[in-house]
C-alpha cells in the first residue's frame, strides 16, 4: 500500500517530469533536425559526385561543371528551449536556374533574339563555359585575336550555328595563309527549349525535394529516439 508521503513524492516527480519534458524534447528534436539536414546535404553531394564521375550512370543527370549549383545548396538548423523555436531550413540561394533544374519548364529568349546553347568548342572538358557569346564577339573584334573571327551558318534543320574561324590569314611557314580551322561554339535558337522536370512530365534533375523525401525513414527513427531520449532525461531529473 502506498503511503501519503510516497504518493506525494511520486506526484512531485511526475509533475517535474511534465514541466521539464517540453524543453528537453525541443533539445532532442533540434539535434534530430540538425542530423537530418546534414544527411540531406551529404546525399545531395553524392548525386553531384555520381554525375561527375560516371556519365553512364542513369541514376542521376547532374554533372558538377562550374560547381555553382552545388555550391548554392545549404541548410540551417535552429535550436531552442521551446518547440516553436526549433526549425530546419533547406535551400538553394544565388543561382537563378535552380528552380528550373528542380521543376523543369520552358526557356524562351527575353531580351535577345536567340537563345545561345553552348557547343563543344565553347566549354572546357568539364563543361564550364569558356566565355559568353558577347565575350566572344568582343574578343574577335579586338586586337587580342587578330587571326580569329566568328561566322554563322545554318544546319539542315534551319538552325543557326556560330563557329570560331581560326587561321586563314597572314603567312604560315610555307608562305601561304595559315591553316583554316572552324570550331563550333553556339547553337542559336528562338526556342522554346524544354528543361526536363515534373512540369514536362519527367523526373526532377536536381531532385531537391526527392532527396529529402528519401530520408524519411531515418528521420522517423531520429524523431522517435528524440522523444524517448527526452523522456528518459526528464525522468532522471534533468532540467531543460
Image (cartoon, grey):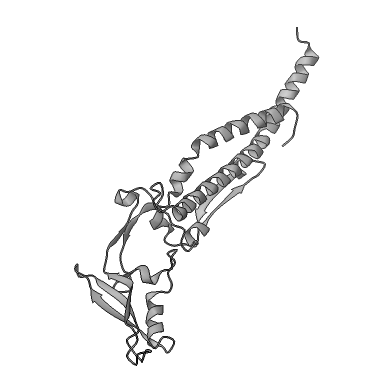
Q: Is residue 30 left or right of residue 4?
A: left
In the rendered image of this protein, does residue 176 appear above or below residue 24? below
**Residue visible at 36% across and 47% down in the picture:** 203
Look at the image and tell me in which quarter the N terminus lies: top right
Query: Which residue reaches farthest top?
Result: 1
Question: Which one is nearer the viewer's eye here, 69 or 129?
Answer: 129
Q: Position of residue 197 (x, y in %)?
A: 35, 51
Q: Position of residue 114 (x, y in %)?
A: 29, 72
In the rendered image of this protein, does residue 184 appear above or below residue 24? below
Q: Residue 79: name its quadrant.
A: top right
Q: Position of residue 163 (x, y in %)?
A: 31, 76
Q: Is residue 19 left or right of residue 213?
A: right
In the rendered image of this protein, does residue 8 appear above or below residue 178? above
Q: Residue 28: name its quadrant.
A: top right
**Residue visible at 41% across and 56% down in the picture:** 99
Question: Which one is nearer the viewer's eye here, 204 or 103?
Answer: 204
Amino acid at each position: 500500500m502506498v503511503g501519503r508521503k510516497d504518493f506525494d513524492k511520486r506526484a512531485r516527480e511526475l509533475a517535474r517530469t511534465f514541466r521539464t519534458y517540453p524543453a528537453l524534447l525541443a533539445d532532442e528534436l533540434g539535434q534530430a533536425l540538425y542530423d537530418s539536414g546534414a544527411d540531406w546535404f551529404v546525399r545531395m553531394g553524392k548525386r553531384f559526385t555520381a554525375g561527375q564521375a560516371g556519365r553512364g550512370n542513369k541514376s542521376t543527370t547532374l554533372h558538377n561543371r562550374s560547381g555553382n549549383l552545388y555550391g548554392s545548396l545549404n541548410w540551417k538548423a535552429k535550436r531552442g528551449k521551446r518547440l516553436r523555436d526549433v526549425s530546419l531550413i533547406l535551400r538553394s540561394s544565388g543561382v537563378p536556374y535552380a528552380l528550373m533544374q528542380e521543376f523543369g519548364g520552358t526557356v524562351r529568349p527575353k531580351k535577345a533574339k536567340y537563345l545561345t546553347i553552348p557547343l563543344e568548342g565553347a566549354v572546357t572538358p568539364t563543361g564550364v563555359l569558356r566565355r559568353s557569346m558577347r565575350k566572344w564577339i568582343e574578343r574577335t573584334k579586338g586586337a587580342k585575336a587578330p587571326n580569329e573571327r566568328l561566322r554563322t551558318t545554318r544546319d539542315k534543320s534551319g538552325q543557326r550555328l556560330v563557329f570560331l574561324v581560326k587561321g586563314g590569314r597572314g603567312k604560315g611557314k610555307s608562305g601561304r595563309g595559315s591553316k583554316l580551322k572552324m570550331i563550333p561554339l553556339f547553337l542559336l535558337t528562338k526556342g522554346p527549349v524544354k528543361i526536363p522536370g515534373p512540369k514536362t512530365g519527367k523526373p526532377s534533375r536536381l531532385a531537391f525535394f526527392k532527396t529529402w523525401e528519401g530520408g524519411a525513414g531515418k528521420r522517423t527513427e531520429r524523431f522517435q529516439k528524440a522523444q524517448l531520449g527526452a523522456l528518459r532525461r526528464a525522468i532522471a531529473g534533468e532540467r531543460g
